[in-house]
Image (tube, rainbow, N blue to C red):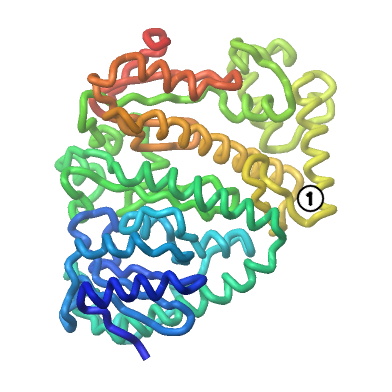
Amino acid sequence: MCNIIETNKQLKNLVEDFNSKENIICLPIFSDRYLHHLNKSNKLSLLYFNDFESIYIVPFNNHESNNLSIDSIGELKNISTNIFTLNKKILLNLLDTDNIFDVNLMSYYLHGNIINTEDIRINTIDFLHNKYYKMNNINSVIPLYKHLEWCDIISNKMTNVIKNFKQLDFEDISSYKNYNNEVIKAFYNIEKHGFKVDSDKLMEAFDIRISKHINDRKLFSEYNLYTSTGRPSNSFGNVNFSALKKDGLDRECFITSKDMLIEYDYDAYHLRLIAHLIDYKFGDESVHEHLSKFYGCSYEESKQITFRQLYGGVDKEIARQVPFFDKVKYFIDDLWNIFKTNKYLKTYIYSRRLLSNGLDKNRLFNYYIQSFETEYNIKKIIEIQNKLKNYKSELILYGYDSFVFDFDKQDGKELLGDIRSILEGDGFLTKIKSGKNYRQMSDITGKIC
C-alpha cells in the first residue's frame, strides 16, 4: 500500500513519524529525466519514501494528484533520521542536510560499481518517454503508480546493498562515511555554480540540441565519482568538461559571469605527487630538467623517457641510474605485495579499497596514483571552498590537475594569492592564467604571490 501526501499537515506528520524510525529511503523524481537536476526548468515531480514499514509519495508536480508547493519541501529538512538515497548530489539540491547517505557509493565500496538502473523496464514509462521524447516534463504526466513501481524496484536493490554494506568492518564503514560527507558535498558545491556560456558559440561548437541544457545562460557539469580509480569523469548534455580542446571553440564558449576566469594548473603534477609519496625532493627546479641530468638528454627527451617509465614499468637500468625511479620501483613492488596478500589496496587518504579486477603491477600503481591525486585534490577543494564562503568568487570547474574560478575583483588580488598558497602546500607548483573566456587566457603566474 502507498500513502499519497497531499497536504502540509500530512507532510508535517510524516516527518514526525520518520523521526521515530532508524532509517528511511528517499528517491527524487524530476519532471525531465534528461535535464540536469540543477536546471531550474527541471521541476521536482515527486519524492518517494520508504521507511521499511510503509511507502509514501509526496507529489510536487504531477497531473493526477493535489500537488504540494515546492516551498513546503523545507519541512523535510527537519528529518533527523538517516536518509538513504541513490545519488546524494541530487538530493543535496533539495535537502542540504548532513544525514544523507549515498547508496551508489556503498555499492561502489562493496563491488567497485554502482546499482544498475538501466535494466529496469516499466513498459508505460518506456513507451511514454519514447513517444513523447520532445516533451520536457513527461515524468509529470506519468501516473504515480508507475513511478511507484519503478521506485519500489530501486528501493529493493538499495536495501540489499545497505544490508551487505553493514557487514563491512568498522574501518571500511568509517572510510565510507568520510567519503560520503566530504567528497560528494565538495563536488556538489562545484556543480551548483554552473559555468556561464556564450549560447551562440556553444551551439556552434557542439549542437543546437545543447540549447535545452542552458539555464540562465549557464551549463551545469556532473561529476561521476564512481570510476575504477575514483578519478571523476565530468560530462553532461554531450559536453565532456574533462576533455575540452585547449585551442578549440568548445573552450571559447565558456565565459566569466563576474570579472574574469582564473585557472590554476599544477606543474608536473603526477611526478610531484609520486615524489610526495616516496619522500623525494624536486625542489623548485623543473621536474623534467631535474631528471634530464640523470638521463643525460634534452628536456623533451627527458619527458618521453619519464612517461615510459611511469606508465610502462620502471626499467632496471633506469632505476639504477636515476635515484627518483629507484625509489619508485621499490614503492611499486611494495604496493604489489600488499595487493597480492590482501586482494585489495587501500587508497592513501580515504582508505577506500581498490579491488582486484584483473589489475597487474603497473596498472595498480597508476590506479593508486590517480586515486591519490583525486583524494589529495578533494582536501584542497574543501579547504578552498571553506575559504570562499565569505567571498563572491566561485570554484566552478575541476580537471585533475587544474582548478577554474569565476573571480570577482571586489574580492581583491590577495584572495588569488591565498588560493595559490593552499594549492602549493607540500611543495607543489602552479601556473596561473586569466581571461574573459576559457580559451583566451594569459599567463599571470608572476603577478600572483
- Position of 330 with respect to 358 (left or right) is right
Quick check: 190 above or below 293?
Answer: below
Please state the horizontal and vertical placement of residue 276, each as a whole percent of the image: 67, 26
Residue 197, above or below 159: above
Q: Which of the two residues, 170 or 208, is positioned nearer the viewer here?
A: 170
Query: Foreground: 284 or 70?
Result: 70
Residue at 19% x, 79% y: name it: 141
Left or right: where does residue 38 sit relative to residue 386?
left
Q: Position of residue 265 (x, y in %)?
A: 45, 25
Residue drawn at the location 43% of the way across and 47% of the way down:
185
Closer-to-camera residue (140/166): 166
Q: Is residue 213 something that shows in the picture?
A: yes
Q: Tell which of 355 and 102 is nearer to you.
A: 102
Question: For the residue labelled by badge 1, is the local secondary structure a helix, a strand or a loop?
Answer: helix
Looking at numbered disc 1 in the image, what kind of residue is underneath it? Phe
Q: Which residue is mark 1?
A: 339
